[in-house]
Image (cartoon, rainbow, N blue to C red):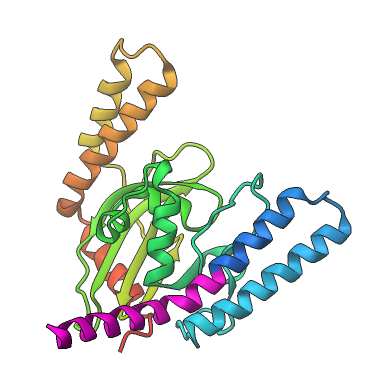
Amino acid sequence: MRSLALLCLLAFATAAHAAAPEQHYLDLRDRFIAKFAKAKENDETYKQHDSALDELTGVLRGLVGPVRIKGLPADGKSNVDTLFKEDVGFGHLDGLGFAMEGDKQQAVVTTTSLLKHWLHEHSKDGMPQEVDAALRSDRFYYQAIQDAAFAKYAELPITKPASASAAVAVLGVRGNGDLKGPPHEIDVVAIQGDKVYFLVASEAAKTAEIPACKKVWKQMMARKAPQDALAKEDQAMNAYTKCFAKEAPSQSWFAATVKKAQSQLERLPLR
């Protein structure tokens, strides 16, 4: 019994030590957020804000370590791009962000501890708390990166590398307006050890409208209830994307889209 207790104590101490660097980052981030919540917005404040993001980037580089993703810059910066609570885009996933010019391809690399903490912070937004469920939810892809909404249209059946504990790919549409239309963005998330890789390719897929789903949309929009136009459109969009996910595997473009998602996964430095 004494040996078992000692082993449990050692395991707890190891876990606490492993979480300590992440906690240092979170404490620092939260101090900055509290500071800028009280600051007057002026040139000096903006200068301090940029300096704070640089400091967070330095801590994240120490947490995440060197990252090489094919086609993206080697030096990442904080994916948290604002510490002002009232800014659009506040609360992005904590991690190192990498991007091509124009943001057509982006990536975030973080740790499992930071991911789980971030999911908990967004629980009030309806974010699933289990990692696997979160990675299959459009809420994750909407809130983790960029400032635009995201509609998930289908999951893509990629092959998980043996070295990874998880690999998920989704097909969707991102934007600040109408999200209905042929999806073209492929997002891939892979977890290996304590590292989480999230890759976004905004113009990766060439798909097409599915007539059966177009019919579903029209039927939903023709209903008398609910009378509220936005609520009706939300319900129609939900039915439309569910139809799309069901019908997508039988479409001529689906195999090529899955292959593209697999090639995106292979860009990640998974050993």
Q: Position of residue 179 (x, y in %)?
A: 43, 40
Which stretch did the figure color magenta?
1-25
Name which residue lies at 83% across and 49% down. 40
Q: Is residue 170 above or below residue 15?
A: above
| Residue at 20% over, 56% down | 252
The part of the image, by quadrant, that contains residue 249 is: bottom left
Residue 171, image quadrant: bottom left
Give the answer, above or below, for where 20 lies relative to 52.
below
Residue 76 appears in which quarter of the rendering?
bottom right
Q: Position of residue 82 (x, y in %)?
A: 65, 57
Residue 114 in percent (x, y) is at 44, 67
Residue 100 forms part of the magenta stretch: no
Residue 9 in sight: yes
Q: In the picture provided, is 97 more to the left or to the right than 222?
A: right
Q: Write the residue at 28% across / 81% down.
A: 9
Q: Nearer the viewer, residue 52 or 148?
A: 52
Residue occupying the far right of the picture: 43
In the image: residue 3, left or right of residue 180: left
Tell me the quadrant of the picture where the C terminus can be found. bottom left
Dominant SS of magenta comes to helix
Q: Look at the image and tell me whether residue 96 can be seen.
A: no
